[in-house]
Structures are given as structure tokens and as C-alpha cells.
Image: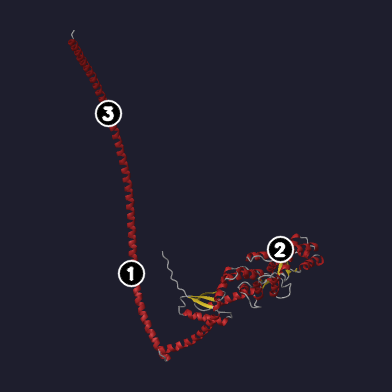
């Protein structure tokens, strides 16, 4: 075989192989395409099924949503319908109320128009009456002029002259009063300070007596107190210096002594003996001694409380004890220790107002009556005794000056002494501090109110400012604004005629008219 044939054979073999490969490949490709189409067709069929399923589900969901929306819409429509019905009800109710109000307003307008008509008629009647009254007054004036022989102007001049004469006396008295007031013009500040000090301090006053009463469980105890042949009662009276009065008073023994400390010792001792039941001379001596020690301790406590209350600083123990003894002393029914404390506070407030030493003023006020603690034991006035005591303990010179001058025995040398003297007078003279002052004070107030109430047209009256002013309330239908001046003068004249009093009394007449309406 030649080379060409070989090549041709190879080429033919190659061509045949290529054709065979092509056909095989074509077959395989067609099979793949056929399978792919089948798969695609399956996918499409499945997609159609899924889409149909989703479509059905979507339709179901849409129907459900539509049903829900329909229900909600119906519910909202129902609620709105209810609201609309309520609003319609309210509107109808308001319309009915407005109709009622309109009817009421119309009725009131009719009433008002009727009242206006009546008022117009009354006004016309009043005008006619007024004209008639004026005519009658003119006739009376003419008749009076004919009877008196004076013209209207002449009568007016005579009346004015008489009134002028009466008023001239009052003007002269007024000028005199004003001159007296001018003399006291310099005391205005002092009075304001005094009133301020009194307002800032107030204390209760205890009125002590010269006798004490001891209660007994029964009348048989009186015989035991007297003892065999009176030895028990003699022992008590000897040891205490107090008189025991055993009379027909049931279940009580009276202790009489002007020394309140000895009386208090005897009272405590007798109460202890009565409670204990053992009453004989030895026991009495023991109990009296114990009672005396107890009273001494109480005296010291009273003094310390006074020093603490007035905050005056340290004080010598002997002076503290003397202050405590003042608790058992009285002056015109006024407890001397409470009076000294009150004087201290008032003097301190006055000193604070004018820029002086407040603590020193309180100290001087508290010690100003220290001499009264022993004035029944030492010769001399309580002022002299107090000066000796204070000099002994080297107190401040202003305290000495206050003690020496608080009763006007000597002229005060310091402002503190003047303040203590003023505070002492205020504490002793204020209403209620002393029994005599209180009685006179109450009687004067009652008399002032009685005089004021005696006038016609007076509703009620009040005496105020410790009797320095009288407020008279009048009945407005009985007394007019002009007549209240006449009433004030009449009250003043009657007070001047019937009462004796220091200083001046201000009469204030008050006329008040009230108009009251009630809104419904």
C-alpha cells in the first residue's frame, strides 16, 4: 500500500470517526435536551400548582381581611352612631334648658317691667308728697316768723350765736386739754416702749395669805395634836413660832403667822405628823427640823429658777437664797418674787428698745426688792437693807442706784435706774397685780360703760385701754351722722360730772350701716 492510500485511509478513518462522534454527541445532546424539557415541564407544572395553591391561600386571606375590615367598619359605624345619638340627646337637652332659661328670663323681664312701673308710680307719689311737704314747711316757716317776730336769717343768727357761745367753752376746754397733751409729748416714745415691754412679757400673780389650813383625816386628830395637857401644841408653836388655831372648823387646823417661811415650815411639819400618826415632842422636834431643811432647799431652788428664768448670769449663792425667800413674801397681795421677775423682764425690754444693757437692766430689776427678804428681821426700810446687802456682795453701781431710787427716795443717776423704777411702777400698778387696784379698775370700767349705755339710741359700749377710751356703738336707725357728735359731747360731760379719774378719757362714737344680700 502506497503512502497516499495510507493517508487517504487515515483521513477516511478520521472522517468516519468524526461523523460517528458527531452522531453520538447529537444523540446524547438530544437526550439531555429531552430530559431538560421534561424537568422544565415538571418545574412549570409544580410552579403552576404552587401558584394555584398560593393564589387560593391569598384569596382566603383577602376574604378574611375583607371580613375583618367589614366587622371593624360595622363596629366603628355602630360606635359613631351611639356617639351621634348621645350628642343628639345632649343637644336636645341643652335646647330644652335654653328654652327653660328663655322662659325664666322672659318671666323675670315681665316682673322687672312690672316693678319698674310700680317704682315709677311710687316715685311720682313721692315727688307729689315732697312738694306737699315743702309747701307745708314754707307755711310753717311763715307761721314761725309771724309768731317769733324774727325773720329766718335773724333766727339763724340768734341760734348760731347761742351755739357759738356753747362751743366756745368747749373750744377753750379743748385748747386747755391740748396744752396738757403738749406737755406729755416728750413721753410718747417712752409710752410706746413701755407698752411694747408689757406686751412682750406677762406673768401670773399669786396672792398669798397670812394663814394656812391643814386638813385632818378626822376630828379625833385634833386631840392628838393638842396632846396631854397641851404639850404637843406647845412644842409645835415653840419650835416653829406659829400659832395653831384649833376651833370648831371640821377636820382642819389653822396656822397663823405673818412670817410665810415659818408658816410653811409649820404646815409641812404638821402635815407630815398627821400622815405619820406619831405625834409626841421628840417626833415633833425631828419633823420640824426636817421640814426646815426642806424649806431651805426649796428657797434655794426658787432663787435658782428666778436667776435662770431672767438669764442674768452668775449670782452669789447668798443672793440666790435671798431671792428664793422673796417667794414667801407678798406686798399688797402681790408675790414679791414674781413681781421682781416681772420688773426684770420689763426693765430689760425697755433697755433693749433704747439701746442700753438689757442684761444689766434685768439684773437690777430682779434685785431691786432684795431687802424685803429680811426686812422683818433687820431694822430699816427694805431700800436701806437692800443697799447694804448689794454693797456687801459688790454688785454693779447701776444695781445700787436702782435699789436706792426705785421708790423716788433719791434721784436716779443712771438710765438703768430710771428704767427699773418705771418697770417697778408698771408691775405694781397694772390691773390685777394688786387686789385693791383690780377692784377699782373693774368698778371704773363698769361705771364708764353704764354712763355710756344710759343715753337713748346707744346699742352697746365698751371701755378699752384700761379705761382710757370708751367705744360707743349707736343704732343707725335712731341716730344720724350729725347727732353722733352731739352724743359724744353729752357722754363726755356726763363722765366729767360723775367720775373722778386721772388723765383723760377718749370717747369714740361709732355709727355703722350695713346692707346685706344673699345670692342664691
Front-most of residues 174 and 207 = 174
Alpha-carbon distance for marks 2 and 1?
90 Å
Please identify the residue farthest to the top as the structure is shown: 1
Quarter of the figure that contains the N terminus: top left
Label 1 sits on a secondary structure element that is helix
Is residue 372 visible in the rendered structure shown here?
no
Q: Is residue 508 above or below residue 73?
A: below
Q: How is the image coloured?
A: secondary structure
Q: Secondary structure at mark 3?
A: helix
Residue 47 tag number: 3
The residue carrying pointer 3 sits among few (fewer than 14), some (14 to 19) or many (20 or more) residues within 10 Å by Cα, namely few
100 with respect to 405 (left or right)? left
Q: Which residue is mark 1?
A: 113
- The answer for how far apart the CA atoms under marks 3 and 2 are is 120 Å
Image point (33%, 48%), residue name: 82
Q: Quadrant of residue 498?
A: bottom right
- Distance between the Cα atoms at labels 3 and 1? 95 Å
The quarter of the picture where residue 271 lies is: bottom right
Q: Secondary structure at mark 2?
A: helix
Residue 192: x percent and y percent? 55, 73
- Dot 1: within a 10 Å radius of its alpha carbon, few (fewer than 14), some, or many (20 or more) residues? few
Residue named by callout 2:
297
How many marks overall? 3
Describe residue 119's horizontal placement relative to residue 15 as left or right: right
Where is the C terminus found, in terms of image quarters?
bottom left
Q: Mark 1 and mark 3 in contact (Cβ < 8 Å)?
A: no
Q: Residue 390's quadrant in the figure?
A: bottom right
Tell me which numbered mark, 2 or 1, is placed earlier along the sequence.
Answer: 1
Whether residue 276 appears in this view of the structure is yes
Mark found first going from the N terminus, 3 or 2: 3
Amino acid at each position: 500500500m502506497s503512502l497516499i492510500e495510507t493517508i487517504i485511509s487515515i483521513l477516511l478513518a478520521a472522517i468516519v470517526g468524526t461523523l460517528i462522534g458527531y452522531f453520538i454527541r447529537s444523540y446524547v445532546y438530544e437526550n439531555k435536551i429531552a430530559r431538560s424539557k421534561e424537568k422544565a415541564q415538571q418545574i412549570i407544572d409544580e410552579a403552576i400548582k404552587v401558584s394555584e395553591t398560593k393564589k387560593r391561600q391569598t384569596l382566603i386571606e383577602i376574604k378574611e381581611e375583607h371580613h375583618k375590615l367589614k366587622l371593624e367598619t360595622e363596629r366603628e359605624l355602630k360606635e359613631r352612631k351611639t356617639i351621634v345619638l348621645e350628642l343628639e340627646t345632649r343637644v336636645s337637652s341643652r335646647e330644652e334648658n335654653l328654652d327653660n332659661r328663655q322662659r325664666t328670663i322672659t318671666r323675670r323681664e315681665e316682673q322687672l317691667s312690672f316693678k319698674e312701673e310700680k317704682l315709677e308710680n311710687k316715685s311720682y307719689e313721692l315727688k307729689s308728697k315732697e312738694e306737699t311737704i315743702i309747701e307745708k314747711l314754707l307755711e310753717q316757716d311763715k307761721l314761725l316768723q309771724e309768731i317769733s317776730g324774727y325773720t329766718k336769717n335773724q333766727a339763724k343768727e340768734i341760734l348760731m350765736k347761742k351755739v357759738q357761745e356753747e362751743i366756745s367753752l368747749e373750744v377753750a376746754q379743748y385748747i386747755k386739754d391740748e396744752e396738757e397733751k403738749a406737755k406729755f409729748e416728750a413721753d410718747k416714745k417712752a409710752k410706746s416702749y413701755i407698752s411694747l415691754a408689757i406686751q412682750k412679757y406677762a406673768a401670773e400673780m399669786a396672792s398669798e395669805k397670812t394663814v394656812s389650813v391643814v386638813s385632818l383625816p378626822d376630828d379625833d386628830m385634833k386631840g392628838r395634836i393638842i396632846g396631854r395637857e397641851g404639850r404637843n401644841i406647845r412644842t409645835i408653836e415653840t419650835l416653829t413660832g406659829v400659832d395653831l388655831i384649833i376651833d370648831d372648823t371640821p377636820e382642819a387646823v389653822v396656822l397663823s403667822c405673818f412670817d410665810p417661811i415659818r408658816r410653811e415650815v409649820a404646815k409641812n411639819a404638821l402635815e407630815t405628823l398627821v400622815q405619820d400618826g406619831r405625834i409626841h415632842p421628840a417626833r415633833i422636834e425631828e419633823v420640824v427640823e426636817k421640814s426646815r431643811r426642806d424649806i431651805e432647799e426649796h428657797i434655794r431652788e426658787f432663787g435658782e429658777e428666778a436667776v435662770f428664768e431672767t438669764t442674768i448670769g452668775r449670782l452669789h449663792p447668798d443672793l440666790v437664797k435671798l431671792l428664793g425667800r422673796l417667794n414667801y413674801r407678798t406686798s399688797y397681795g402681790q408675790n414679791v418674787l414674781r413681781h421682781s421677775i416681772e420688773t426684770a423682764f420689763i426693765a430689760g425690754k425697755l433697755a433693749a428698745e433704747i439701746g442700753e444693757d438689757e442684761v444689766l437692766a434685768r439684773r437690777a430689776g430682779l434685785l431691786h426688792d432684795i431687802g424685803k427678804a429680811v426686812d422683818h428681821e433687820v431694822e430699816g426700810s427694805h431700800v436701806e437693807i437692800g443697799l447694804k446687802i448689794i454693797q456687801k456682795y459688790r454688785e454693779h453701781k447701776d444695781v445700787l442706784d436702782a435699789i436706792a431710787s426705785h421708790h423716788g427716795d433719791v434721784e436716779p443717776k443712771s438710765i438703768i435706774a430710771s428704767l427699773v423704777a418705771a418697770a417697778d411702777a408698771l408691775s405694781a400698778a397694772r390691773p390685777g397685780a394688786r387686789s385693791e387696784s383690780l377692784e377699782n379698775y373693774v368698778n371704773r370700767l363698769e361705771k364708764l360703760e353704764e354712763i355710756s349705755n344710759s343715753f337713748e339710741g346707744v346699742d352697746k359700749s365698751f371701755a378699752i385701754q384700761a379705761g382710757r377710751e370708751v367705744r360707743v356703738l349707736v343704732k343707725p336707725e335712731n341716730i344720724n351722722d350729725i347727732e353722733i357728735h352731739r352724743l359724744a359731747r353729752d357722754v363726755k360731760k356726763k363722765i366729767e360730772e360723775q367720775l373722778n379719774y386721772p388723765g383723760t378719757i377718749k370717747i369714740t362714737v361709732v355709727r355703722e350701716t350695713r346692707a346685706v344680700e344673699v345670692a342664691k
